Image (cartoon, coloured by chain):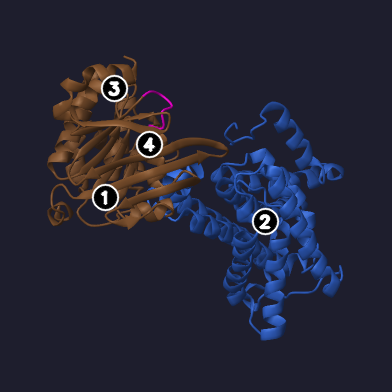
Amino acid sequence: MAEAAAKPAGAEILSVSDLQAWYGESHILHGINFNVKAGEVVTLLGRNGAGKTTTLKSVMGIIGKRTGSIRFNGQDITRASSDRIARLGIAFCPEERGIFASLDVRENLLLPPIVRSGGLSLDQIFDLFPNLKERLNSQGTKLSGGEQQMLAIARILRTGARFLMLDEPTEGLAPVIIQQIGHTIARLKSEGFTILLVEQNFRFASTVADRYYIVEHGKVIDGFANSELSANMDKLHTYLGV
Amino acid sequence: MQALYAQLLVGLINGSFYALLSLGLAVIFGMLNIINFAHGALYMMGAFCAYFLLNIAGIGYWPALIIAPIAVGIFGMILERTMLQWLAGLDHLYGLLLTFGLALIIQGVFQNYFGSSGLPYAIPSELQGGMNLGFMFLPIYRGWVVVFSLVVCLATWFLIEKTRLGANLRAATENPTLVRAFGINVPRMITLTYGLGVGLAALAGVLSAPINQVRPLMGADLIIVVFAVVVIGGMGSIMGSIITGFALGVIEGLTKYFYPEASNTVVFVLMVLVLLLKPAGLTGRAA
């Protein structure tokens, strides 16, 4: 919380310019430009395979080859290793959730190290996700899909990172669980977290996002604020093909 | 009956070495995805380290039990940093060839200076002699090896399965990329894990020095059986490799009593059976 107070609202936390990235030989990102300001929820929208996940992974430093510029709190992290990036205060919740089968729920929850003070305590986490408390001794992958998603979000809230990247947190979940995740994101935002979200579920995104960027063929081709949403609906339908 | 108990004891002793070595192999395989063929050579280096400590520096068995695993473990970590780390993500075959080559080089160097015959290493005075248990005579040193190995194996199991550090290790075995993205220095963890596995091998080497003498090829003979143990137990499991190690030692010992002709082959016959019936090993996860 101190972190958010120290940053004037609206200061740029993450700025990405001309980001290009490769998976082995294949060139995936062809120049991504966007920024995220303190306290915002920014959503990357786009079709499957457009490069949204690769963008998050590039910011996190887990794509082998990347060029361009990624700056976090003014620091250049384009070439940094992912463990260093995590220690600067960026936390990542992957699309496949990444719950560890050989760890129980408690171990999964305690796995990410604390990178700075100000993270949620276990009590606060159980307040957000009461289900987890009852399942602490279960094997991580024995949880339901929704519980696994909650666990994947919960474990990065402990670390003190104030910048969260959530990759399709609603994928494959029941509407009631999606609603709960929406409430969680709203609550995190109100507590000063900055969130970069990747979503296919545009309707869900519209309930939480401040701004949108459209990603297509490895480029950001458009961007607008939530207030401009209705004016952009037609364009959006074309972009997303819905 | 005396002979049966004696063979059982020999089996337990061999089982101790099998367990310590296959445990290290399992830990290394889990983290580095490398089948560490140099394991036998590193075991031998542990025994030689104890021998050097005693004959050059006058440092005895008890300090050697700590110093040798650390020294050889550091040697292992240097191997990992300078060579093995570059094999990450490649086919198993490369790791196997590299470590096999390393084993040949290490053993060759030792053979060049020490020949092939055994160098003596005395049992420490505290553990000399034996006890009459009524049904058999137990040499104290052999009893010590079995008990101490069991304690070390269980401590390693506890470290990996029940502690925070172990949870990091298990998680990194499953998904190193994500664990690193949480801020954990996975490359350093891999190096330390290799050091731990190598240290266990060196510890087994020190334990075996007073029993089997110190020879450049002592590990080369043993490691073939240990790989059979690992295949039977299954690569991925910690407790599996401990139990299989001890169990196969005992089975070998029993075979020596009941049908000595088969004692050298029984482990391999079991390996064939296990491969036919349960290719992932008794406790292993299917690939």
- The circle drawn on residue A161 is 1
- Distance Cα–Cα, label 2 vs label 4: 42 Å
Discs 1 and 3 share one subunit: yes
Q: Earlier in the sequence, mark 1 or mark 3?
A: 1
Q: Chain of mark 1?
A: A
Figure check: A69 above or below B44:
above
Residue at position x 46%, y 46% from top?
Answer: A66
**Which percent across, then down, holds residue B71?**
61, 71
- Distance Cα–Cα, label 1 vs label 4: 15 Å
Whether pointer 1 and pointer 4 mark residues with C-beta atoms closer than 8 Å, the reply is no
Instruction: Say what amino acid the circle numbered 3 marks.
Output: Asn
Q: Chain of mark 2?
A: B
Discs 2 and 1 share one subunit: no
- Distance Cα–Cα, label 2 vs label 1: 46 Å
Instruction: Say what amino acid the circle numbered 4 marks.
Output: Pro
Q: Which residue is mark 4?
A: A94
Single out the mark in the foreground, 3 or 4: 3
**Colour in which the image shows chain B:** blue
